[in-house]
Image (spheres, rainbow, N blue to C red):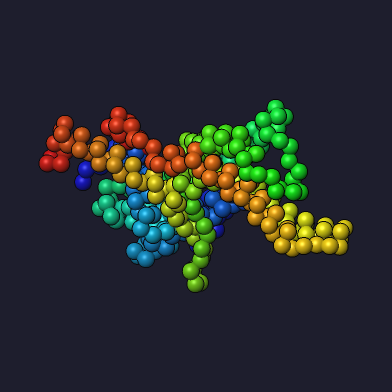
């Protein structure tokens, strides 16, 4: 029995892909030829004839090589999750933070001391009013890129999720600093601060973002005209 | 036996593969065999027509391939339908249903 991988590699030439991917494709195509060979052998074909048929199975290896290259280039280097979650999500996060910065700079919102997030909730109201539009933008972008329900939610809620991550990261550091520097740490005060911070910066903004996201969680309305034309690949 | 023209085959190929994979994960050789068996040989995929299509569908996020080996058998790349592929299958089925209904109204293909 021939070395099927060597045969495929020799017939196809180099695909110009990453070495690992190229090896994977060659192994897969070689496996297919081997399966065909085994099938023909089981049907009673002599080994030499089965090998010869397998060799003739692809009439134009150069064309197959071109088709595979074309297929592999489709979609560029960006994968589906990047297009549906990370790009719209990071843009949503940037917009939300930029809006907050602009509001503070313009004096619409007071400046915050991030280590003491005990400010009243109503301080955030101007920023919160803008968040539904930002959430809607993230969810719309994700849906446009083909994102499913979870992708749209994730893209729209990334600002609130990032702030949640920040708070979860900051709490132990805050406790540690208090213990080391002040040697007078009160856990209950830290936990209350954490809860208030989560409410002000995560839960309420998350709800505001969700208001904008909700209309984009529904399936897009089908275009009747496009459904009536012949399907194409 | 009547042979379907390549253009119609190309348009139907995605639907055939997605529908097949909605049942269970399969490797490339199995996909080709099942399609041939289940269509009585009317639809036929050879290596050159199957793999570029599978790779394109994988790039689009409709299917996901992963190497698996069962027992002493050599590893094979099994393709699974993704959530996106499952969602793609629904309108694709509907489009083809509409297409055949329209063709039937026009040319009576269902009764030919």
User: Is residue A42 visible from the viewing direction of this image?
Assistant: yes
- Residue drawn 45% across and 52% down? B82
Which residue occupies the foreground of this view, B60 or A176? Answer: A176
- Residue drawn 70% across and 27% down? A106
Q: Quick one: which residue is furthest to the top in this view?
A: A106
Q: Position of residue A132 (x, y in %)?
A: 53, 37
Left or right: A179 as drawn, with respect to A188? right
Q: Position of residue B1 (x, y in %)?
A: 21, 46
Which residue occupies the foreground of this view, B78 or A80? Answer: A80
- Residue drawn 71% across and 48% down? A117
Q: Position of residue A80 (x, y in %)?
A: 53, 43
User: Is residue A15 visible from the viewing direction of this image?
Assistant: no
Q: Quick one: which residue is furthest to the left in this view?
A: B111
Q: Quadrant of the C terminus of chain A?
A: top left
Left or right: B106 as drawn, with respect to B31? left
Left or right: A156 as drawn, with respect to A58? right
């Amino acid at each position: 029995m021939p070395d099927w991988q060597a045969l495929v590699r020799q017939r196809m030439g180099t695909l110009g892909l990453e070495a690992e991917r190229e090896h994977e494709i060659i192994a897969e195509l070689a496996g297919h030829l081997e399966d065909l060979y085994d099938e023909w052998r089981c049907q009673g074909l002599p080994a030499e004839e089965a090998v010869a048929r397998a060799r003739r199975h692809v009439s134009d290896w150069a064309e197959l090589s071109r088709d595979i290259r074309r297929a592999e280039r489709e979609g560029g280097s960006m994968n589906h999750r990047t297009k549906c979650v990370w790009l719209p999500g990071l843009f949503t996060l940037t917009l939300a933070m930029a809006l907050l910065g602009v509001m503070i700079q313009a004096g619409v919102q007071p400046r915050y001391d991030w280590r003491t997030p005990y400010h009243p909730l109503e301080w955030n109201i101007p920023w919160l009013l803008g968040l539904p539009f930002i959430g809607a933008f993230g969810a719309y972008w994700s849906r446009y890129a083909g994102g499913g329900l979870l992708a749209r939610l994730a893209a729209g809620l990334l600002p609130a999720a990032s702030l949640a991550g920040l708070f979860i990261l900051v709490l132990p550091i805050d406790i540690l600093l208090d213990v080391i520097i002040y040697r007078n740490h009160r856990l209950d005060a830290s936990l209350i601060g954490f809860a208030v911070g989560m409410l002000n910066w995560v839960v309420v903004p998350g709800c505001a973002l969700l208001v904008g996201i909700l209309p984009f969680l529904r399936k897009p309305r089908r275009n009747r005209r496009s459904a009536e034309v012949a399907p194409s690949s | 036996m009547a042979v379907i023209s390549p253009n119609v085959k190309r348009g139907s190929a995605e639907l055939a593969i997605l529908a097949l994979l909605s049942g269970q994960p399969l490797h490339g050789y199995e996909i080709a065999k099942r399609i041939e068996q289940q269509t009585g040989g009317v639809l036929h995929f050879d290596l050159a027509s199957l793999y570029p299509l599978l790779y394109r569908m994988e790039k689009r996020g409709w299917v996901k391939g992963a190497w698996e080996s069962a027992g002493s058998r050599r590893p094979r790349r099994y393709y699974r339908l993704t959530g996106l592929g499952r969602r793609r299958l629904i309108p694709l089925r509907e489009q083809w249903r509409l297409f055949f209904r329209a063709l039937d109204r026009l040319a009576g293909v269902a009764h030919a």
